[in-house]
Amino acid sequence: MGVYPGEPMRRTLLVAFLLPVLLLSQALAEGGKKGSADPRAELEVKQQKLREEKKDLKGWMALADFCELNGLWPQREEILRKVVSIDKDHAEARGRLDEGKFGGGWLPIDEAEAKEAEVYQAKGLAYYGTKWIPEKEAEKLRAADRKKIGWEFEIRVDTAHLNLFSDCDLAKTRRMASLLENTVGAYRRFTGSFLKLQDPPAPMKVYLCAARPCFVQAATVARGSPLPGDVGGVYAKSKILLIGCGTDGVIDEGNYAHCGVHELIHGLDDQMAKFPNTQDPIWLLEGW
């Protein structure tokens, strides 16, 4: 079980997403292939080969992975931009650039989701799971899920590997879903580069609690013991991840993103049962 003490962090969610990449590159390199001794020189060689095959999307995406592994962040973004210049609807590259689709084009993810919500909510639809559906249908599904999990949540957002139940607003819940799913992707890229791991078991249940009392109560039940006062996230081996968004309903995005990423990595380690010591580098890099 992971327990993570939270502290407010005024960083963007994109930086919070890059955190697990840095953590994993250090932790996993100790047990397998290390990054390049001269990554910039190696990158130039790899790029030169790809320039001869300009539309090799798989090759360009692999090069973006290489940049992540070696901490070449500006080059990573440049390469992902190269991918979307070849294929403007390349979903993975757009996702890693933190963009979402709206009206036939691509926008920053927050803007795209806000515009989408405005359109569908005006039609009386509610987002539930993975799509917009009539509010009455959403309420029936919500009632069934509330009975099943024993929590009066408002929002459910599903990704490929996660089910998020939340009493935060839709925008923050979808943002957290995107962040955590991207973290799963980063984890898979780094672990897979060493051990050829398959997808982690899915789905993991994530409870995103806006109010501190709600989080404390749920986390205490999941842990089976009282929760320390400064904890901001908990992973229980029942494959449940709980994240406290703030105190008295005031949501600190940097805090919930940071705690969520930490605990998700703990959960993935537990499910994979491959990297039991990953937590140590995470704590060593706490001040990053």
Image (cartoon, rainbow, N blue to C red):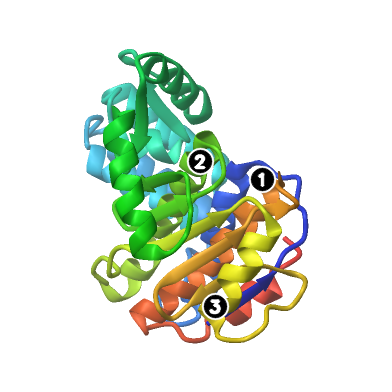
Q: Give above or below for 41 relative to 234.
A: above
Q: Is residue 275 visible?
A: yes
What residue would you read off at disc 2? 175
Residue type at mark 2? Arg
Instruction: Determine the residue positioned at 63% across, 57% down.
Output: 258
Crowd rating for badge 1 (residues with CA inside 10 Å; few <14, some 14–19, many 20+)? many
Q: CA distance from mark 1 to mark 2?
A: 10 Å
Check if mark 1's residue and mark 2's residue have beta carbons within 8 Å: yes
Residue type at mark 1? Glu
Q: CA distance from mark 1 to mark 3?
A: 24 Å
Is 201 on the left or on the right of 187, as rendered?
left
Nearer-N-terminus badge (1/2): 2
What residue would you read off at disc 1? 253
Q: Mark 3, mark 2: which one is toward the viewer?
A: 3
Check if mark 3's residue and mark 2's residue have beta carbons within 8 Å: no
What residue would you read off at disc 3? 221
**Spot occupied by residue 58 in the image (x, y as percentages of width and height):** 24, 44
**Spot occupied by residue 56 in the image (x, y as percentages of width and height):** 22, 37
Is 225 on the left or on the right of 228, as rendered?
left
Is 35 on the left or on the right of 287, as rendered?
left
Crowd rating for badge 2 (residues with CA inside 10 Å; few <14, some 14–19, many 20+)? some
**Spot occupied by residue 25 in the image (x, y as percentages of width and height):** 51, 66
Instruction: Determine the residue positioned at 27% across, 44% down.
Output: 59
Nearer-N-terminus badge (1/3): 3
